[in-house]
């Protein structure tokens, strides 16, 4: 279900760099690494928020 | 060509032009108009003054387009209104043969390649941006061009893969017809579905690893908004040179795709060994005489095969839709017409027993053939026995369908004594098609049409009819 809210063009844009050849593979790899770092950081923040107590989290509709 | 909620008598927006909110298409009579909002108008200003665009308009790779002063069909105040040359008959990628889809793909890529040299890109790359005038592909979505922002990847890449590259790979690598896949989804084939079809022992096919396998993997792993991705790609060193390399490599890949199949059910029909030569000559004369009586705006040739009769009709018509269910014979016809430079015949993969339905939003985004095309003459030569005996469609239903087209029909009926009819009945349960007799067919014809001419071919087992729409109901059917 989560994937339904994501923009599939993101992955495609990165792959279009790979399709450009060797130089593009480097760009794609650096982009993916940056994304993984962001993802890891975001996961840590989420975990931290959970440990700090529910009162800091805004209710969502 | 209608939009829900429009006022009666006022033109309404084309039901397929809503996806890009900066531009809408409407029709006034035979004129095709397009409104552009401020942003699209600014992009058009840049595009229309570029050299690649002017050259592509001049050699008709992009549809002829001029700026006009026309009112909007609704309350929207368009910054610019464009008028496009009318495409005689709109066809869709799920009705094209392999070479047609390949030529449409190459046209798209070569335009994108020429545009980037002048700092212009395309915001999409759907196969619906291309139409055919005869056997010549034409790019019709002018507002697709917009200024390129340095460091951006090609936004059309995903659509190009889904609607051009994967369908072409299916046919080239797996001998799978692309038409059912594109007819099944207006967005084409997803990377994951392409991977599942193309993977296997021979998945070392050119382009498979990056465009299919890796693309499918990335779909599952990259999970954030595309705007962030573009920024990150810029930071990672993405440049215009990489954009150009992507397009160049795609051009080489698509150019190299070949469909190896050389045989099909109807691939050898051109020899027409089941016809006596005199029958064939007289049949040609019958069609020629009727076609030459007056100029028709649109002719359908159902079961056109090698286009022998389409070519006869084309000399007296604005456009002939040469339809056949066999994608290989349509592909051959297309390539012949492309070589000839014939513009009056549009080949089309179409099974009249299972015609193209409306697809996309509301079932009207890409409407069925009968909503975008209206023949005034139909050639139904040697098809009625296939509809009746192969597809089990009752004769009355076939004739009702023809009658609903409200066109003149040239109908060839092989009788129950024809060897091809006997061949088709051989594998059917005994008695199933006992009602398939010339007498029964003629009486149903007489109930529905005015028969202008009828002729028995010298072979004695085939009959030709020239049918005209009946303007008042026959007493027998009241």
Image (tube, helix red, strand yellow):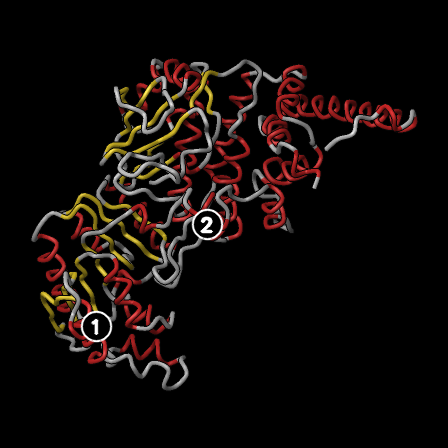
In what element is the residue under mark 2? helix
Query: Which picture quadrant has residue A4?
Result: top right
Tell me the residue that label 2 is attached to: B183
Above/below status of B242 relative to B158? above
> In the image, residue B257 lies at what x, y percent?
47, 42
- The answer, for residue A22, to whether it is visible in the render is yes
Numbered-mark total: 2
Tell me the residue that label 1 is attached to: B477
CA separation, marks 2 and 1?
37 Å
Tell me the mark number nearer the camera, choosing from 2 and 1.
Answer: 1
Locate the N terminus of chain B by quadrant.
top left
Above/below status of B151 relative to B391? above
Q: Residues within 10 Å of mark 1 (few under 14, many from 20)?
A: few
Query: Which picture quadrant has residue B16?
Result: top left
In the rendered structure, which disc, 2 or 1, sits on the residue that comes first in sequence?
2
Above/below status of B107 relative to B320? above
Residue at the image position 28 percent from the left and 23 percent from the top: B71
- The answer, for residue A23, to whether it is visible in the render is no
């Amino acid at each position: 279900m989560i994937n339904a809210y994501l923009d599939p063009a993101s992955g495609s844009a990165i792959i279009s760099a790979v399709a450009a050849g060797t130089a593009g593979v480097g760009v794609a790899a650096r982009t993916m690494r940056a994304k993984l770092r962001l993802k890891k950081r975001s996961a840590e923040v989420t975990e931290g928020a959970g440990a700090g107590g529910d009162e800091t989290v805004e209710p969502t509709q | 060509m209608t939009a829900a909620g429009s006022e009666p008598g006022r033109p309404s927006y084309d039901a397929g032009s809503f996806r890009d909110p900066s531009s809408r298409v409407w029709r006034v009579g035979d004129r095709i108009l397009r409104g552009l909002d401020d942003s699209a108008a600014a992009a058009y200003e840049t595009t229309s003054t570029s050299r690649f665009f002017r050259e592509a308009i001049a050699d008709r790779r992009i549809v002829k387009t001029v700026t006009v002063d026309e009112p909007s069909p609704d309350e929207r105040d368009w910054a610019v209104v464009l008028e496009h040359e009318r495409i005689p008959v709109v066809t869709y990628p799920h009705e094209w043969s392999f070479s047609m889809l390949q030529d449409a793909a190459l046209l798209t890529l070569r335009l994108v390649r020429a545009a980037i040299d002048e700092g212009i890109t395309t915001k999409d790359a759907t196969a619906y941006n291309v139409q055919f005038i005869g056997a010549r592909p034409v790019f019709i979505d002018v507002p697709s061009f917009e200024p390129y922002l340095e460091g951006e990847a090609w936004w059309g890449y995903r659509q190009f893969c889904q609607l051009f590259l994967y369908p072409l790979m299916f046919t080239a690598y797996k001998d799978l017809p692309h038409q059912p896949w594109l007819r099944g989804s207006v967005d084409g084939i997803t990377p994951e579905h392409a991977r599942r079809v193309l993977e296997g022992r021979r998945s070392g096919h050119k382009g498979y690893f990056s465009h299919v396998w890796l693309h499918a993997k990335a779909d599952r792993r990259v999970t954030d908004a595309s705007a962030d991705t573009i920024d990150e790609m810029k930071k990672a060193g993405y440049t215009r040179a990489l954009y150009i390399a992507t397009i160049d490599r795609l051009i080489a890949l698509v150019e190299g795709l070949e469909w190896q199949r050389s045989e099909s059910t109807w691939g050898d029909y051109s020899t027409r060994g089941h016809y006596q030569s005199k029958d064939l000559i007289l049949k040609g004369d019958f069609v020629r005489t009727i076609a030459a009586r007056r100029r028709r705006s649109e002719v359908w040739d159902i079961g056109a095969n090698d286009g022998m009769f389409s070519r006869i009709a084309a000399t007296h018509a604005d456009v002939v839709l040469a339809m056949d269910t066999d994608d290989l014979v349509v592909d051959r016809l297309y390539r012949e017409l492309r070589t000839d430079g014939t513009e009056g015949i549009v080949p089309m993969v179409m099974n009249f027993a299972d015609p193209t339905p409306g697809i996309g939003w509301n079932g009207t985004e890409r409407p069925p053939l009968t909503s975008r095309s209206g023949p005034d003459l139909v050639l139904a030569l040697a098809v009625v026995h296939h509809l009746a005996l192969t597809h089990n469609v009752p004769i009355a239903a076939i004739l009702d369908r023809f009658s609903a087209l409200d066109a003149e029909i040239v109908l060839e009926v092989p009788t129950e004594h024809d060897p091809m009819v006997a061949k088709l009945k051989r594998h059917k349960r005994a008695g199933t098609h006992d009602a398939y007799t010339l007498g029964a067919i003629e009486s149903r014809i007489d109930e529905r049409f005015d028969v202008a001419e009828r002729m028995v071919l010298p072979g004695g087992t085939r009959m030709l009819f020239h049918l005209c729409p009946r303007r008042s109901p026959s007493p027998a059917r009241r």
